Image (cartoon, grey):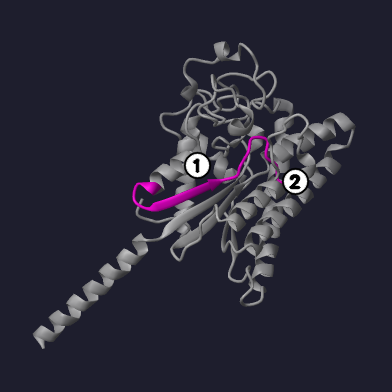
Amino acid sequence: MYRANIVVAVCAFALLLSAAHAADKTVYQYVIFGDSVTDTGNVFRDGGVPDPLIYYKGRFTNGPNWVDYLNQSLSAKHKVQIFNYATGGGVACSFNLNNTRYPYARDAVNQTGNFLADLARGKVPTTKYTRRISVSWFAANDITVALSRALTSGVDAATAGRQIVSSLATCLSQHVGALAASGVREVVLLPQSPVQVAPLVPDFLRPSVAQLVDAVDAALVQAMAAVNAQLDAAPAGSPAAGAHVYLLGDSKWIGRIAPAVRPAFKYMGDRSCFTNPDSSMRITPGLADRICTDPNDYAFYDEIHPTTNFHKAYALDALLPRLQLFRLAPRDV
């Protein structure tokens, strides 16, 4: 009897080792969409911006961004592939895209199309070990562009706000739906960032922008619930069958990150390391001479983009735990 138990135990241990070995073969493939906060060099490759004298290696910050930090953390123990289609100036809704002023920016439809084209050409590999997870972070540019348009066109704030909320819910629903229809079974949507705290937003507008952001939060909850209901009803065997959209919280969750960073920022949304007189998507001669000497004392590097210390906290202390909670990232990192 004792010998039989030993044999059973050895067999069980062998099975565990076999399972662990199989798990080790998993390739976590993250397909990423978004704007300048997420771009890891796409716009720089195409257009030479942001200014390399000011910004770090095509990132719109003073160091690695959240995609870099997440990749570094996960890659330490696991096989990870990152396919990043985010661009500076990226928007969820195509009518908020200004290709005349920012020719290298891409909206969600174009970014998704580029991914699908690469997938069809085999540039995004698919194997039996591939676990494909999309991560999308849009809406900040949509809000700022739409608000600017409303302020200059005379549209009343209430009407403009309703239009912004409705359009974002629609555009992002279409975006995640298209990804699910392409066969991406795990679709992550990051919530709207609290743009009202950025130095770009004047003090007198912050309460109104905060209300707008809250409305976007609520609309996205309803919109993603509707998308998931449609996905649940997808016919068995169809590309969307078994797909699910994970909305990882709201803007208030993101808003709690910067105050928790240690060492603490000396300056939050009241000022940035420097102010870009035009746009980070254009090069301003002489601007590099006006950069602060201690950027990581600031939550914001320029008037809209956070510093690398925020990116690190966001990636490792906020986003990664949420991905792990929903089993969208390995838990042993």
* Residue 316 showing in the rendered view: no
In front: 150, or 196? 150
Is 119 included in the stretch rendered in magenta? no
In front: 208, or 80? 80
Q: Is residue 319 above or below residue 261?
A: below
The residue tagged with tag 2: helix, strand or loop?
A: loop
Location of residue 74 in the rendering, given as x and y in whole percent from the top left corner: 40, 48
Q: Which mark is residue 2?
A: none
Q: Residue furthest left?
A: 2
Dot 2 or dot 1, earlier in sequence: 1
Mark 2 — residue? Answer: 93
Q: Left or right: where does residue 311 sit relative to residue 6?
A: right
Write the start and end of the magenta stretch as one range: 75-93
Q: Which amino acid type corresponds to the residue marked 2 in the rendered image?
A: Cys
Q: Residues within 10 Å of mark 2 (few under 14, many from 20)?
A: many
Q: Left or right: where does residue 125 sit relative to residue 3?
A: right
Q: Which amino acid type corresponds to the residue marked 1 in the rendered image?
A: Val
Q: CA distance from mark 2 to mark 1?
A: 23 Å
Q: Say if mark 2 contacts mark 1, CB within 8 Å.
A: no
In front: 40, or 278? 40
Q: Residue furthest right?
A: 154
Location of residue 27 in the rendering, given as x and y in whole percent from the top left corner: 43, 57
For image coordinates 61% across by 76% down, the residue present is 237
For image coordinates 47% across by 42% down, the residue present is 315
Mark 1 — residue? Answer: 67
Q: Quadrant of residue 244?
A: bottom right
* Picture quarter with the N terminus: bottom left
The residue tagged with tag 1: helix, strand or loop?
A: helix
Q: Residues within 10 Å of mark 1 (few under 14, many from 20)?
A: many
